[in-house]
Amino acid sequence: MMRTELLLPEMLLAGGALVVLLGGSFTPRHRQWILRGVAAAVCGTVIITAAVALSDPADTAFDGTYAVDTGTGVARILAATGCLLVLALAGDELARSARESDAYALLLFATAGAVLLAGATDLLALVVGFLLASIPLYALIGLAGTGAGAEAVLKTYLLGALFGILLLLGVTLLAGITGTTAYAELAARLPDAPRSVVTAAAVAVIGGLMFKAGGFPAHFWVPDAAQGGTATAATFLTTVPKIGALLAVHRLAEVLPGSSNWPTVVAALAVASMLLGNLAAYWQTDVRRLLGWSTVSQVGYLLVPVVATGRSDLAQPSLLVYLAGYTVTNVAAFAVTAALPRHRDRTSWRGVAATAPWLAAALVVALLGLVGTPPTAVFVGKLTAASAAWDGGYAWLAVVVFINSALSLFYYLRWLVPLWQPWAVAPPDRPGRWSTTVAVVAAALSLVVGVAAGLVWRAAGG
Amino acid sequence: MLTAIVFLPLLAAVLLAVVPRCGDVAARWVWVGTATVELALVGVVWAGYETPPPGELAFAERAAWIPGVGSSYHLGVDGLSLPLMAMTAVVFLACAVYALRERHRPRVQASLFLFLQSVCLGVFAAADLILFFVFFDLSIVGMYAVIAGWGHGDRARSALKFFLYTFLGSLALLTGFIGLYAAADPHTFDMPALTAQNPLAGRPLAGGLVLAAILIGLAVKTPTVPFHTWLPPAHTDAPAVGSAVLAGVLLKLGTYGFVRIAAPMLPEAWRGWAWVIVAVGVVSVLYGALVALAQTNLKRMIAYTSINHMGYVVLAVGVAGLVGVDTAEPRAVAVTGAVTQMVSHGLITAALFLLAGVLYERAGSYDLHAYGGLAAPAPVFAALFAVGAFASLGLPAFSGFIAEFQVFAGSIATAPVTAVALLGILVTAALFLRAGQSLLTGPTAGCAKGFGDLRANELWSVGPLLALSLLIGVLPRPLLDLVEPAARTVVDLLGR
């Protein structure tokens, strides 16, 4: 039986995307801001409807292929919030540009895809969500229209195709050995399936999802896209798709039998993402690329609570709290780069604290937040994620998390220090108004989420 | 009440930061005013303090924070934390008065120091490990900004070294906290609950690892040998008020952690490692003193004596873990001495660093050999420096004597071999006498020519600190009455 009211947020996102796409064709270029308003209104409505639905008991739609529970509810709110912040950010960069309304439609489509990924409890629904979240991204990155942008699109597309096939391979294997694609039945049948096949399939599916999460080994497109794409695209694709992908891995982990060694696989991916992201970020001078690598390391931290799935009660709430903190903090950091688009080299950030103190403050909160300094939201996320891992018998993973946090401090600080130094040649540009506002609001949100962590934790089902 | 004490400076800091129209003069006086109110509030708490029963805290406040992970907003004081809170309030007030003549962005400076005061008081008042860590970590961020923004010399590098080093330490600490949390049943971060539970009893390996993580975190902050290398550059390049707060208050966050968290929550592992801790303490005492003796830079010298003085504290808390027949009494004396030493060192070192700041402000040099015969042009400075030096080397009638006497009385009675650390006192005495001689006596020469004596704000910041040290030295009873029951509780907890 179809129960449409359960899927109101998803339908709003997809329908809103269509309205924006079609409406854009009939709106003159100087009035395209109306469509940004429409898209923002859609996101706002999604947040409200999802928040209302959060208090309802867990349910499923489409014959059990799509879960409407706390995880999906929080993912809806976070994805829509991320999308809303990105839409506001686009006010500086995309206003009156040639593909303005198209970009907004693509953002909404990709958000819908991320939410579908988060809620999918059927392998085929998972694949649909993967494709819906991926294809708009290619176009979004390409909107930059530059050489670097084209290279980033190509890289993203090729990796997306490759890992999409890997995902399909894993899905085929799982469906082949169990005769079903529904998670509920997989959970019942997988323990009796051949162990090696299940392990191979788990590696394939989780590996495929790593493309959307932007984690090792499918991370190569992230720094290129962050550097070569528009600020809008860079902010979006390092934030919203991760929400969907990580919840998808979490849901899959609930189904996989412990004998398939999936925790070891996920733990290895987590460690590799953390280490690689942090070490690669050391050498970057372009701030957008630096942030790109930093998001790779953040995926590593985000995978830590996933490892504890089924072994610790803290796993799911800590994942959701970390995702909430990550969403606002990462948007804040990227929004700061969007506010000064010509300041790409980190040494060109000299004097920003004097000319734009609020922007500098937002960057301090965002970067120290990404390190995990209290009382920001990512601190609570890291703390609870490490606690979940320790509680689930992976104490060494908690230690790795903190060693990596210490590693990451250096390159974040290296960007922060010039802000207070006097400028060398010319004063910094005037920061964009929309981006600055988004940066300050998102940074403030990361503090609020951190201080009010108890409430967020309860909303996340803890 | 404690909430007001902890968050009032933060409120003032935020107001100063977001109201740019507030003038520099107003900002300086807002800082002094807030620090005065803070001292008065801590005084009220001290006056109303009654020793709580063991395992409980006075003036406790508790509210839900993140119940899902067993963390709550829990504040409280006892005989270990209240003296340190009072010392913190005094040191920050002295810094506020000293900074009345600051010309470099005084509004932001006042805001930053008020923020630091908030987080330092928060660490001492916290009765929840996560709350403790939040404040502990923020103190690093605040001090980094102080050194990088108001320091001199190679300040960016020193500040970065300080940040990286202490941040690494704080993450080790957090790892240990999570270990305690995971071992506790039910899972909790609440300090009194964890202390009562003794969560890792009977698990020597896990207990040892968790204690190692916590000890490394606290040893970096304290700092003890071999984790001390961040301290001398940080002090040398920090502004005078920054050094005073760093040495006076921030180092105590580490030593306070020993008596508040490490020893009471992991008694079994602490006893197992006690000799290692004692050894680290003795090495810190001797190494700090000997390296200080070799310095010609006054600030570096005082910085190394801080390592020496913190070594006495580490020695005493290590000795507290050497449980044996009939040693409970001397071990309690040692712990009392450790807490007294924290208070005493805070007052005296803050005063010495402020005096070093006067030197730099007048002549731009910390080099002992650049000065000579300061007693003639600057008699008040000379007198206060001499008093500070004598107080620091542990002359009777000053607080340092009370503290070090108890540390040694307790330590030697429990483990006679620790008497070797007495050499540290001897070396410190020699180096302070030598520094005083080089700076103050002889014909007026070098930078000392035309040296202006202390101004009112300098006198009224340094003077009260030393006067308080003298007061504690002459009348130690009010302080000891506060500390002794808490020290006995620590020793009892260690005996479990």
Image (cartoon, helix red, strand yellow):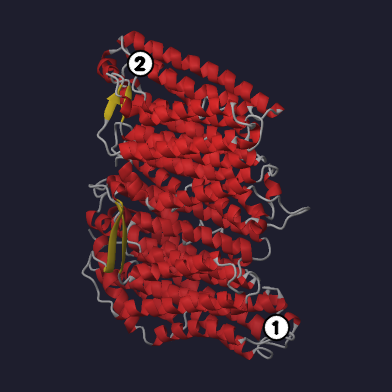
Q: Are marks 2 and 1 in contact (CB under 8 Å)?
A: no
Q: Is residue A75 left or right of residue A357?
A: left
Q: In front of the other: label 2 or label 1?
A: 2
What amino acid type should be assigned to the residue bearing mark 2? Val
* Chain at tag 2: A
Question: Compared with residue A27, is residue B426 higher up or lower down, i.e. above or below?
Answer: below
Mark 1 — residue?
Answer: B372
Using the rendered image of the protein, determine whether residue B243 is visible from the camera's viewpoint.
Answer: no
- Between B99 and B159, the residue placed more toward the observer is B99
Where disc 1 sits, the SS reads loop
Q: Is residue A28 left or right of residue B259?
A: right
Question: Compared with residue B405, is residue B475 higher up or lower down, i.e. above or below?
Answer: below
Q: Is residue B274 left or right of residue B293?
A: left
Image spot of residue B143 (x, y percent): 54, 62
- The image quarter containing residue A21 is top right
- Between A420 and B234, the residue placed more toward the observer is A420
Whether labels 2 and 1 belong to a single chain: the reply is no
Image spot of residue A189 (x, y percent): 26, 15
- Between B204 and A383, the residue placed more toward the observer is A383
Image spot of residue B61 (x, y percent): 28, 65
* Chain at tag 1: B
Labelled disc at residue A198: 2
Picture mark count: 2
Where disc 2 sits, the SS reads helix
What amino acid type should be assigned to the residue bearing mark 1? Gly
Q: Is residue B32 left or right of residue B59?
A: right
Pointer 2: residues within 10 angstroms few (<14), some, or many (20+)? Answer: many
